Amino acid sequence: MEFSIIDIFLSCFATLYGVFVFILTLALWIYRSPRSQKQYFVSVLIPARNEERHIGDCLEALAKQDYNQDYFEVIIINDRSTDQTSAIACSFTPRIKNLSVIEITETPADMAPKKYALNEGIKAAKGHIILCSDADCYAEVSWIRTMTECFAPEVGMVIGYSPIEPKNPWSVFHHFVALDSLALASAAAASCVWNKPVTATGRSLAYRKEAFNEVGGFSKIAHFISGDDDLLLGLFKKTKWKMAYNIRRDSLVLTQPPATFKQFVNQKIRQASKGRHYSWNMVAALVAYYSFNLMLMTYAPFYLFDGQSNFWKWYPWIAKFSSDFILLFVGAVRFRKLFFLIMYPLLAFLHPLYIAVFGAWGQFGKFEWKDATHEKHLKV
């Protein structure tokens, strides 16, 4: 039995990867969201641009929240919409006690549109806690309450889980997107054990207004098209504040998968494009993870046709797939999303290809944001 340098390298890397994912899995299993008895006044911010199809459902969910309406406000930031977004939002005034709509007619050249919209909302916000979501999302009934209860005195930011639900239960594409969102949420929640969350999503994200002002708001990341979530998270990591993950029941913010594969590609390029602006240790980890998946994808055909395939040749794949499954299984149990796993055996083989393609494409490709096209995400 002969092993090449590539075989040995992949086997060693796969072992290290398996150990790391096992540690993450243990952390995810033991993690508990912090609890606070203090009742804060909360400002819920929903930036919206041409969202007449979704804004009604979004506000319907907010109207049903089990948090006392005397203790929260909802601010819709209507970002240059040309449809009925504003009118639909205003129609909820009788049902949501503290509802207001901010109208944006133009944006500055030195700040990305969504960050500008959020920034205008934060300036108008009366709450000690800023709670953000998107207009095409639908919060579970206890979202505001459970997110707010995570703000122990030392906590400056709380990350929530926003699963991308498979619209078609038998769609391979929809389940791939759902598993991807579950994997990111599982890693983020687990890493909060060390106060080092690896990612966040703007669909469910809360932070103290005091802490936001302390990091300079969006000023240091203003010109990036996206990054109002994980790039802001990177700024918070440099402060004394702790970060928490809301893993409690009835705390999810639901959203639908991209309607088409093209939309999914655009979304992933936009998300991957931020990678080079993370901290150096995060970038190093992403590069190593990317390289591992690229090598798995590149050398798989040789393993299939070299006539000497055996267990040890396939060990890197086995180590990756089994460790990934255990992490996803624990995440699915904790987030109550076990049905996300029904297509895992098939989707697991696609994952290295997905990482290799979109990891590179995100650094060099173009993507669309609303009605504009951007190159390499560098400037608005």
Image: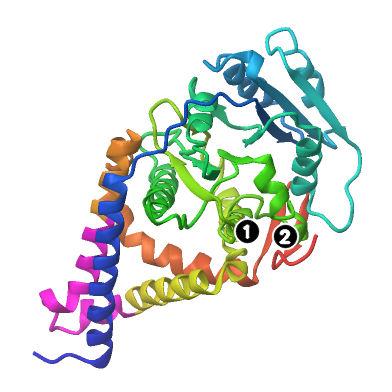
What number is the disc on residue 215?
none
Q: Residue at x 30, y 52 (%)?
A: 27
Q: Main secondary structure of the magenta part?
A: helix
Apparent side of residue 216 relative to residue 347 in the rendered image (left or right): right
Q: Position of residue 1 (x, y in %)?
A: 8, 90
Inter-mark Cα distance, 2 to 1? 9 Å
Dot 2 falls on a residue whose secondary structure is: helix
Q: Are marks 2 and 1 in contact (CB under 8 Å)?
A: yes
Between 359 and 250, the one nearer to me in the picture? 250
Residue identified by numbered label 1:
235
- Which comes before the other along the chain, label 2 or label 1? 2
Vertical arrangement, residue 303 with respect to residue 56, above or below: below
Q: Position of residue 354 (x, y in %)?
A: 44, 62
Quarter in which the C terminus is drawn: bottom right
Residue identified by numbered label 2:
221
Q: Position of residue 124 (x, y in %)?
A: 81, 33
Does residue 306 appear anywhere in the picture? yes
Q: Quadrant of residue 14?
A: bottom left
Vertical arrangement, residue 372 with respect to residue 160, above or below: below
Q: Is residue 321 magenta?
A: yes
Dot 1 falls on a residue whose secondary structure is: helix
Between 189 and 340, the one nearer to me in the picture? 189
Does residue 343 appear anywhere in the picture? no
Magenta segment boundaries in residue numbering = 299-324
Q: Is residue 226 magenta?
A: no
Q: Amino acid at mark 1?
A: Leu
Q: Residue at x 33, y 40 (%)?
A: 340
Q: Quadrant of residue 314?
A: bottom left
Q: Amino acid at mark 2?
A: Ile
Q: Residue at x 65, y 14 (%)?
A: 70
Q: Position of residue 379 (x, y in %)?
A: 78, 64
